[in-house]
Image: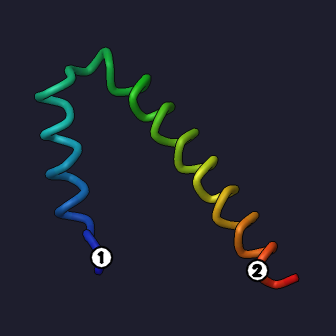
């Protein structure tokens, strides 16, 4: 399942309305770091299952 470009624009507009322009960089940074930690955890689990 893929969101696509129009869906991403809609999500961005909704986030801008809800949180305002001053909060968006902070929220984006938090989301990015959470995604990075999640990928790291998934990679660690997949490496352990290969052993």
Asked if residue 4 is positioned above or below residue 32 in the image, the reply reads below
Nearer to us in this view, 5 or 49: 49
Could you tell whether 22 is left or right of 28 in the image? left
State the scheme by which the image is colored. rainbow
Q: Which mark is residue 49?
A: 2
Please, which residue is most extreme toward the top here? Answer: 22
Instruction: Residue 17: name its quadrant.
Output: top left
Which residue is drawn at the image coordinates 29% and 80% (left, top)? 1
Which residue is drawn at the image coordinates 25% and 57% (left, top)? 8
Instruction: Residue 45: name its quadrant.
Output: bottom right
SS at badge 1: loop
Which residue is drawn at the image coordinates 20% and 36% (left, top)? 15
Nearer to us in this view, 1 or 43: 43
Asked if residue 20 is positioned above or below residue 47 in the image, the reply reads above
What percent of the width, then of the height, locates residue 50? Answer: 81, 84
Could you tell whether 24 is left or right of 41 in the image? left
What percent of the width, then of the height, locates residue 6? Answer: 17, 63
Mark 2 vs mark 1: give the one in front. Answer: 2
Per the image, the residue denoted by label 1 is: 2
Asked if residue 30 is positioned above or below residue 7 in the image, the reply reads above
Q: Which mark is residue 21?
A: none
Mark 1 residue crowding within 10 angstroms, few (<14) / some (14–19) / many (20+): few
Which residue is drawn at the image coordinates 50% and 32% (left, top)? 29
Between the residue at mark 2 and the residue at mark 1, the CA separation in whole angstroms equals 28 Å
SS at badge 2: helix
């Amino acid at each position: 399942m893929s969101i696509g470009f129009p869906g991403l624009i809609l999500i961005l507009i909704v986030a801008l309305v809800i949180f305002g322009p001053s909060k968006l960089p902070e929220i984006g940074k938090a989301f990015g770091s959470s995604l990075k930690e999640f990928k790291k955890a998934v990679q660690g689990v997949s490496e352990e299952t290969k052993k």
